[in-house]
Image: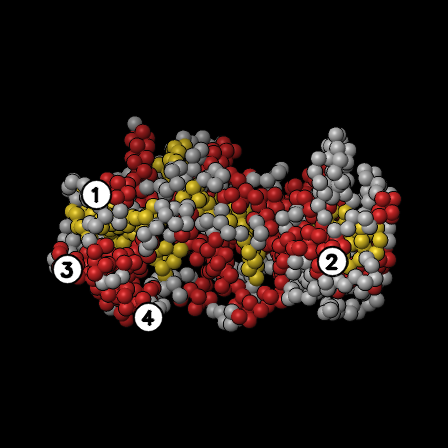
Amino acid sequence: MATATIEAAPVKYTAADYKSEVKPIWCPGCGDFGVLSAFYKALADLNMNPANTVLVSGIGCSGRFPAFVEAYGFHGVHGRALPLATGVKMARPDLTVVTVSGDGDAFSIGAGHLPHAARRNVDLTYIVMDNEIYGLTKGQPSPTSPHGMEKKASPYGYPDFPINPILMVISYGATFVARGFSSRPKEVTDLIKQGILHKGFAFLQIYSPCVTFNDTFDHFRQTTANLPTDHDPTNRMMAIERAMSLDPLYLGVFYQQERPTYDQTMAEMRDKSGGQFSLEKLIGKYRT
Amino acid sequence: MAALENDLVVRIGGDSAAGGIVTTGEVFARIASFVGLEIYTTRTIPAEIKGGHVMFQVRVADHPIYSQGDELDLLVAYDQESQERYYNLLRPGGIFVYNSNDLTPPDGGGVKRYGLPLNELARKIGFTRGRNIILIGALVKLFDLPYDRAVEVVRRQLGRKKEMLEQNLTALQTGYRWIEENIGVESPFHLRGTSRGVSDAAQDERLVISGNQALSIGAIAAGCRFYAGYPITPASDIMEFLAAEFPKIGGTMIQAEDEIAAIGMAVGASYTGARAMTATSGPGFALMVEMLGHASMTETPLVIVDVQRAGPSTGLPTKVSQGDLRLAVFGGNDDSPRFVVAPVSVEDCFYQIIHAFNLAEKYQMPVVFLSDQDMSVRVQTIPPFDLSRVKQEPRLVWDGNGPYERYVDTPTGVSPMSLPGMPGGQYTAEGLEHYASGAPGYEPELHMANMEKRYRKLDAALPDIEAWGMYEQFGDPDAALGIIGWGSTIGPVREAVARASENGIPVAVFYPKALFPLPDARLKAFLEKRQAVIVPEMNYTGQFAGMLRARAQSYGIERPIVKVNQYGGRPIATRQVYEEIVALDKTLRK
């Protein structure tokens, strides 16, 4: 598998170096803390240069993530983290781009962007912290909430059925698809590192329970399990089959594939165009 | 009739399923421009892909033209529908050329009628799809244009395949001969200025170009290197243009999955330092408004082109309107400053898009660029672009010294911006209200100070708007009667004012090209000298008139405003403006 070469920064960073001065506003015990510390650790392990790293987010508890990291950040509007991140990466392919969303941001309001970032194979890492609820707006069901869940907005049980993000994203053509659980930080660190090193669109669904509105820590402790040792991430059918399993809910890298990234394809287009340009000549084409 | 003419309006109508109506018009217009004449084209195409009525109009003259013209000198009808729609627009003494195989002309009415058996002629040369080229040949003869120039244009425009070229040239000759043999040597229209040779043509620097093309070239000249868009009539050809050119200059064009993604990508690219643009039309612009507010809040430079078409909703996708002004100026939740720039013509699209980029970059703010369907798709002759007028205002980038604060307040409100890759410049561009560092903050004093900071940038830009000449002012500076307008209505206004002047009615005209912020000093001075003003607009409610009334009130100047609204999806006519001038002049004289 081809991996990105990360330019060695002149200094050796520690996890603490990536902590910004802004303190997280999440509820004590929130799964997002686990993801954040795993993220600091992953950046340190890869010795990422904060100045060349850009974090892009949408709206929700997840949206606050970039502010807590010592790196460049963009806190966008709801559901549009992927287009914003695509713009960043395509304008500046030299930057390492990480996009962060929650399940509402990624799979509800922003779901229309996911297939396109995946099929283009934009070289970025997309971390979706999935708590199966809208936390910031105080507990409405989300596209990954179970059918029948009783909340204020679904007093007689949630009428919708949940989507399967891993299955969906594999079918969209993502070239790296993985799942983690915030209570298993070592594995999450490892998945984030693999995602960043992967050349192409890396999708990470991280179960990250909401202690306040949807405490599913026990549920995920009981139902998650590592992908079997015989799992072959280059085998798409096997990946799809295991993505469909609800008990256990597998953790690990479901699928990985090598394919030209969007910026590589764009570079090819530039070669194809011949690269010859003159404004005067272009205008000359419109002479009478 | 055989007297020298110097200004003629030709309209061609037919069904798009039959094909070639626009080609007929375009090739004919190019022949006219190639022999040294000025052209101004207008078209209405159906919103459907196949089938539906198509109209192509070209006004040809030996002097600059500013509008499509009010009445027809020559009507060419392929089918019955075209005859029914346009016959009564022919001026007395005008000419009606029709496909005599498909329709019967109405009785006389002072119109000369020439029936061309187009189907029959096409069959005779074994080229049934060549009716439009036969017609071009006929028009060349009717206008007494040099035949060799016509051959040259057909060769250039339609000569990509050799066999096809032979057929096309045969068709051209067939039409030309038919007129010669059936109508005679005496041509009904002799246009002046048609006698120049090939060498003159080769030295001609004038351009035959559309507004979207001029805008795209202007964007490149302005340093734009990132574009994301989503297909929408009538803006798609900007995307197609840049798709071909950007790769050659290291730029990036992305066809996004929707308009929200398109503006998002442009904002993301601009955040990294790229000069970025997206283009759309009304429905797409409506979708972009949330992100427009975000760019205003995060102080991210961006150019959003809205090629206005008639709405609301899907409306009339291929028809013109100026109905998005209010959305452009006020669209968004709460007060979010942006610039709104409006070009007035095809040529002006080139210069104003450069100003739009410069405002965006210098003041770190989104700019809405309001062109319209008419000027964007219309092809016309214009003077060559003056490249010496192209200036790129740089973005104020952080110098890399000392601790960095992204949104630090300054006298102009513009804060130095760090770009990803600059060590020590890390910050989060924040859509929440924020401290100077970018960290979220919600105190009332902070929000108030930031509102003032963001709006202060508009005031800071006013001297540039003045210095860059973002307005047109003409007519009689002492006239009691004024016209204030925006965008492409300036063409018919220019002609109406010239006609009024010939008839002894002085009129003063003011067209700001920055519609937000409006150039208050200039506007106030203009209003002070007028007794009443006409505001022509292509929308129903008079959106600009409403804005003007509010500004005038804020200056303490009350002047009667006469609205002239064209909301049928077509341009304002010169006559419509002229009649309003005459009526208002009468009232003022009482």
Give the distance between the C-alpha atoms of the residues marked 3 and 1, in whole angstroms: 24 Å
Chain at numbered mark 1: B
The answer to which of marks 3 and 1 sits earlier in the sequence is 1
Do we see residue B549 in this rendering?
Answer: yes
The residue to which callout 1 is attached is: B91
The residue to which callout 3 is attached is: B180
For the residues bearing labels 4 and 3, Cβ distance under 8 angstroms = no
Q: Nearer the viewer, residue A106 or B319?
A: A106
Q: Amino acid at mark 1?
A: Arg
Q: Nearer the viewer, mark 4 or mark 3?
A: 4
Do we see residue B272 in this rendering?
Answer: no
The residue to which callout 4 is attached is: B162
**Which disc is residue A260 wearing?**
none
Give the distance between the C-alpha atoms of the residues marked 4 and 2, in whole angstroms: 54 Å
Q: Nearer the viewer, mark 2 or mark 1?
A: 2
Q: Nearer the viewer, mark 1 or mark 4?
A: 4
- Residue at image coords 42%, 62%: B386
Whether marks 1 and 4 lie on the same chain: yes
- Residue at image coords 54%, 50%: B304
Q: Nearer the viewer, mark 3 or mark 2?
A: 2
Q: Amino acid at mark 3?
A: Glu
Would you call the spot at circle 4 few (<14 residues within 10 Å), some (14-19), or many (20 or more)? few
Q: Amino acid at mark 2?
A: Ala
Whether marks 4 and 3 lie on the same chain: yes
Kindly state the secondary structure of the residue where label 4 is placed: helix
The answer to which of marks 1 and 4 sits earlier in the sequence is 1
Give the distance between the C-alpha atoms of the residues marked 3 and 2, in whole angstroms: 76 Å
Would you call the spot at circle 1 few (<14 residues within 10 Å), some (14-19), or many (20 or more)? some
